[in-house]
Every structure is written in structure tokens, then in C-alpha cells.
Amino acid sequence: MKLDDAMLDPAIYRHLRELAGRIHQERGGAVTLQPTALVNEAWMKVHRHGGEFRDRKHFVAVACRAMRQILVDYARNRLAQKRGGALQRTTVAGVGISSEPIDFLALDAALEELARARPRAAEVAQLRVFGGLTVAEAAGVMNIGTSTVDRAWRTARAFLGSRLRS
């Protein structure tokens, strides 16, 4: 699957745009990185990936990772510009990690720590949090069973919840 084919698929673009909109809305709209800009930056980042994907699922997984990286980079830049004074926080209540606002830098650090200990759980968390995928969709992307994804998701939620509360 070529990148151009993937981005011409209105369903994929709509999914990424809805996810970016939800992230923007959860941040109270206070962020200057608009949903369309996030999707466009993700497309550019994915384009640099090389443009070849096994299938639509692979493209979505790569796009989720790109959106995560963009949001983390954006948070780092804002932190550097404001010296921590106006660090933007968001919630990830929609997927059950935390109903309290957290920042993307803390979430990214926790995901990196989780990836070292439990790579599958970290991948599931990335797909669920940054991709908005359901357990069944994540199972399809990862080519594993839904019960395996469900167990990994429970592990990820517990791990991330404990790290983000401390």
C-alpha cells in the first residue's frame, strides 16, 4: 500500500481528523496546534517514513506513532518556550487511564518505561490512546487476539495510571 493511496482514503483521513479533534477538545481548545495541523504534520512525518505500508492497519499504526511524537515534541517546545509556566495538560479519560489532566511529556515517559518492560502493552496503549482504536481494532492492527490485547490493555492502564498519579 502506497502512502498516497492511504491518504486518499476518506475513511482513514476522517478517523485521524476525529482523533485529532478529540485530543484538541480534551485540551479545552486552548492548544494552538489545531486538529487539521496535527493531521497534516502526521502525514508529513509518515511520508518521511518511506511511503510503503503492508496494509491499512500498518498505516494507521504508523500514523498513531507519528501523532504521538508530534504531540510530545509540541509539548516539549511549549515547555522550553514557557519554561514550564504554561505546560498544557490533557486527559485520557476516554480510554480509562486517568480522568485527571496529565501532560504528554509524562505520558510519553511512562509509555517509554512501559515499552522497556512490556512492549506489547506499550503498543496497545499507543494504539488506544493516540489512535483511538478499540480493543478489536488494535487486535487487528497487531494481528493478535482480542483477549491478548485486552490483557495487555489492562496491564498498560494499571502501569500508566500508577506512573501518572505519582
Image: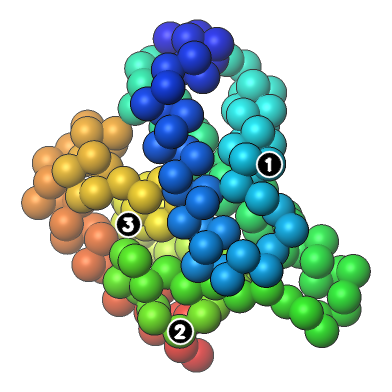
Q: Nearer the viewer, mark 3 or mark 1?
A: 1
Amino acid type assigned to the residue bearing label 2 in the image: Glu
Q: Residue at x 87, y 78 (%)?
A: 83
Location of residue 44 (image quadrant): top right
Q: Which mark is residue 121?
A: 3
Image quadrant where one finds the N terminus: top left
Residue 88 placement, left or right of 155: right
Q: Earlier in the sequence, mark 3 or mark 2?
A: 2
Q: Earlier in the sequence, mark 3 or mark 1?
A: 1
In the picture of the structure, the residue carrying the numbered disc 1 is: 37
Amino acid type assigned to the residue bearing label 3 in the image: Ala
Amino acid type assigned to the residue bearing label 1 in the image: Ala
Q: Residue at x 9, y 51 (%)?
A: 147
Residue 60 placement, left or right of 67: left
In the picture of the structure, the residue carrying the numbered disc 2 is: 100
Q: Around disc 2, counting alpha carbons within 10 Å, would you say few (fewer than 14), some (14 to 19), or many (20 or more)?
A: few
For mark 2, give the secondary structure: loop
Compared to 85, does 139 lie above or below?
Answer: above
Compared to 3, does 131 lie above or below?
Answer: below
Q: Around disc 3, counting alpha carbons within 10 Å, would you say few (fewer than 14), some (14 to 19), or many (20 or more)?
A: many
Q: Nearer the viewer, mark 2 or mark 1?
A: 1
